[in-house]
Image (cartoon, grey):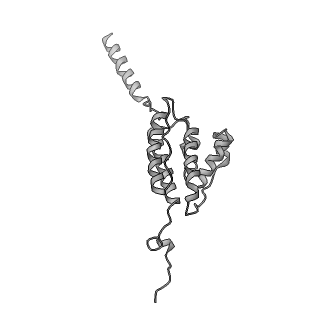
Amino acid sequence: MKKSLALALCLSSIVASAQAPQVALVTERDGLAVLGRVEQGLRRTIGLPDTPARTGGTEVLSRTKIVNEFYRIYTEAKPLFRVTPMPFEIDRPLLQERVKDAATRAKLETLILAGCIPPKGVLVVGPAEGLTAEQFGRNLGLFSNQILRLTHQPDPNWTPNLQDNRDPL
């Protein structure tokens, strides 16, 4: 009896440790707070006026809400773009399958073409409605990096692709 109880306890602990840990998704309050800080830095860097901070509740920050926030910042920064982005390819059948809302799909297409969101990233094909902190951070970093890249005119003296490659002699 004692051996079978010990074996059952051992097996239950093995099964419990083998199960995938529950990963918390980013809440609206946390996600919008982080996005607000990054947006404030972006605005100061590229010369846009500050906006009031957005707040949210304890519900999960949805992918649609993230796309809407990214698109809002993108459209405000677009007049300051100094470089035309090379368009990225879009898997439109996959996008139509995963994103049912036409307005969100159009915003995603714009952001993907500009290189602000990976074409097959979690915002497009993710299994959950929300993102983990790591996924949110990666997407926010990629987005802000691309906005800064598009609003910065490279200096030909320091950018080999823009230099005149003729022989000076």
25 is higher (above) or lower (below) than 47: above
Q: Of 70 and 112, which appears nearest the observer?
A: 70
Q: Of 86 and 72, which appears nearest the observer?
A: 72
Q: Quadrant of the N terminus?
A: top left
- Judged from this view, the residue extending furthest toward the bottom is 169
Q: Residue at x 48, y 54 (%)?
A: 145
Q: Of 52 and 45, which appears nearest the observer?
A: 52
63 is higher (above) or lower (below) than 88: above
- Judged from this view, the residue extending furthest toward the top is 1
90 is higher (above) or lower (below) than 81: above
Q: Residue at x 43, y 45 (%)?
A: 37
The mark total stands at 0
Q: Residue at x 68, y 46 (%)?
A: 93
Q: Residue at x 35, y 14 (%)?
A: 4
Tell me which corner region of the image, top left, top right, bottom left or bottom right, holds residue 45: bottom left
Q: Is residue 63 left or right of residue 29?
A: right
Q: Position of residue 98 (x, y in %)?
A: 63, 40
Q: Position of residue 6 (x, y in %)?
A: 32, 16
- Judged from this view, the residue extending furthest toward the left is 2
Q: Of 98 and 155, which appears nearest the observer?
A: 155
Q: Position of residue 165 (x, y in %)?
A: 50, 80
Q: Position of residue 40 (x, y in %)?
A: 45, 48
